[in-house]
Image: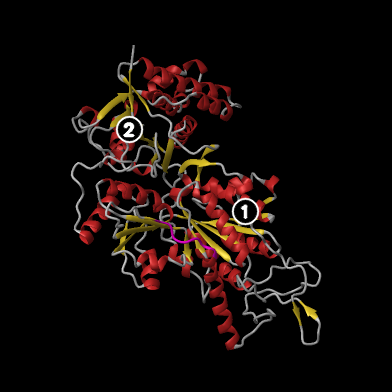
Amino acid sequence: MTKQVKQLDRVIIRFAGDSGDGMQLTGDRFTQQSATFGNDLSTLPNFPAEIRAPAGTLPGVSSFQVHFADHDILTPGDSPDVLVAMNPAALKANLQDLKKGATIIVDSHDFTGRNLSKAGYDHNPLETDELDEFAVHSVDLTSMTVEAVKEFGLSRKDAGRAKNMFALGLLSWMYGRPVDPTIAFLERRFAKVPDIRDANVTAFKAGWNFGETTEAFVVQYEVKPAPMPTGRYRNITGNLALAYGLVASSVQSGLPLFLGSYPITPASDVLHELSRHKRFGVTTFQAEDEIAGIGAALGAAFGGSLGVTTTSGPGVALKSETIGLGVMLELPLVVVDIQRGGPSTGLPTKTEQADLLQAMFGRNGEAPVPIVAPRSPADCFDAALEAARIAVTYRTPVMLLSDGYLANGSEPWQIPDVEQLPRIEPGFATGPNHTGEDGESAFWPYLRDDETLARPWAVPGTKGLEHRIGGLEKNDGTGNISYDPANHDFMVHTRAAKVERVAESVPPTEVDDPVGPDGQGARVLVLGWGSTYGPIGAAVRHVRNTGLRVAQAHLRHLNPFPKDLGEVLKRYDAVLVPEMNLGQLSMLLRAKYLVDVVGYNRVRGLPLRAAELAEAITDLVETQTGDEPVPGGNHETEEVR
């Protein structure tokens, strides 16, 4: 039969089922297909913390959302256009996020009395009118999958596990996704188990063929490739980009990379990835605990390596004493904190931005460290390079604040030209640097560079550069132990001044503030940091398309701030600061610049919703300017609708 083909500019699909239904794999494969096709995309994996959460229950639902488009997009989207629900729990857990008219594809096989009860239903929603406002397709995916793969002799349970590939095949047909990459992937992944390989490939093809032949789906959709700058691209997650950035930092500095780490969600993937790159001189050490991991990394830094440790918020608390030791020793160390919901164990697989104040102040004494934060999954690569540059140049621990959304989310990444990456100069000490009154040459480990205030980095074993290190206060210059009050005061101020010197190498704040026809800019600035970049950008686009003026800026450097930030803030009548915490950046800005910024704070374990943020921005602009959105303006833009 001939099917209608309809053009769309973007689509948001959410695959949802039990944590054992393969939803992460299904979403990842659809994402890879879309990347191969050339769409811009953004993803949001969302899964339970338990290895195998209770089957059929709401807490056990795992989902993967992918937003793909023929134009530049910034977020995974607020509301799915299509929900694929493998059981009643998946339907109930995600139904509230759908808007009227959304498409729902459900596996009717699992809508049994027992499964409905486990999901909290006292009835079958497929047999009532409560889903009438949606386009519902009730399909027995499981039975069709079992029938399609029966030739391979699998048990019904094993055969049914391929239903995610049937669903992937169906959705691939609906949206014209290329199928060859997925077939090749399945053949590689299950090469050692031919029956499982063939069953998954067959189920995938059966899903495609079902879409092609059934009368239940009469429309096929097309989303054209997005225009992008010329170059080589790949889809990349934040953790993978971060790992690549650390390897690049090692290459660009000429330093061997040493990772001392203890596995913790959501940072473990960085350890896993770096362990694959021994050919680049990478050494990975999976320690027995968080303290041992950072201790080994700091020891490696003393030995002349690029020392790195990865963790999440609970691990930072355990590492705090050693970070303070790194501040005292003044050695390069990159501390990667992939933030997650807290406090305590909190929400291990959910995202949050609540470790900023811990990064700023979570050590005893005056122990300042520079802080950088990536804004998108691909930007994790550049943020890692920047953190390493600061650590090596200024001889200091540096905190890199990513989060679970960036770590597991993905987007297209233009592979950089290695020749264009910045060089990082370690500048090791090579000989004595001080001449005493007696004319004798000596090495003083705490003499400082006039420009950076960094002390010399002397590799142990270098003749003539023998020196002691430790956590006790150092005498200026000599590095000898000192209890002198005046010296301690001087060293405390010097270490703080060294961190402030980082601002000399930080670019000015980039402010996106389009000037209107009257030559005037906006009176309201939206300022963010970290992974709020996407929702803020989408919300700002929407507000501007309603005719209102609003400016946007985003911070990568959180300590020290860019030198011009105070001046930028004072140019605006109001500054809105969206964060996934209770106002931590707002607190820092108020304290430093005496600007009464307005906080927009949501701590839900999920990224900010662009539509809700757009409403908050609109309200603030109306309050400050008296302007109102233009009736009939283009409100159906990007991620906000």
Placement of 146 over or under 305, stated as above or below = above
Give the residue drawn at x 55%, y 60%: 335
Instruction: Name the quarter where the N terminus is drawn.
Output: top left
Dominant secondary-structure state across the stretch colored magenta: loop
Give the residue drawn at x 32%, y 54%: 515
Placement of 76 over or under 340, stated as above or below = above
Q: Is residue 371 magenta?
A: no
The x and y percentages for residue 381 are 54, 49
**Is residue 284 among what the camera can see?**
no
Q: Quadrant of residue 354?
A: bottom left
Q: Which residue is mark 2?
A: 82
Could you tell whether 481 is left or right of 504 in the image? right
The stretch in magenta equals 505-511
Classed neighbour count for the residue bearing mark 1: other residues with Cα under 10 Å, few (<14), some (14–19), many (≥20): many
Q: Amino acid at mark 1?
A: Ser
Residue mark closest to the camera, 2 vs 1: 1
Identify the disc placed on residue 87. none
Q: Earlier in the sequence, mark 2 or mark 1?
A: 2
Classed neighbour count for the residue bearing mark 2: other residues with Cα under 10 Å, few (<14), some (14–19), many (≥20): many
**Is residue 517 among what the camera can see?**
yes
Q: Quadrant of residue 641?
A: top left
CA distance for labels 2 and 1: 41 Å
The x and y percentages for residue 625 are 22, 59
Callout 2: SS: strand
Callout 1: SS: helix
Give the residue drawn at x 38%, y 71%: 593
Identify the disc placed on residue 249. 1
Q: Is residue 509 magenta?
A: yes
Could you tell whether 505 is left or right of 411 in the image? right
Give the residue drawn at x 27%, y 38%: 98
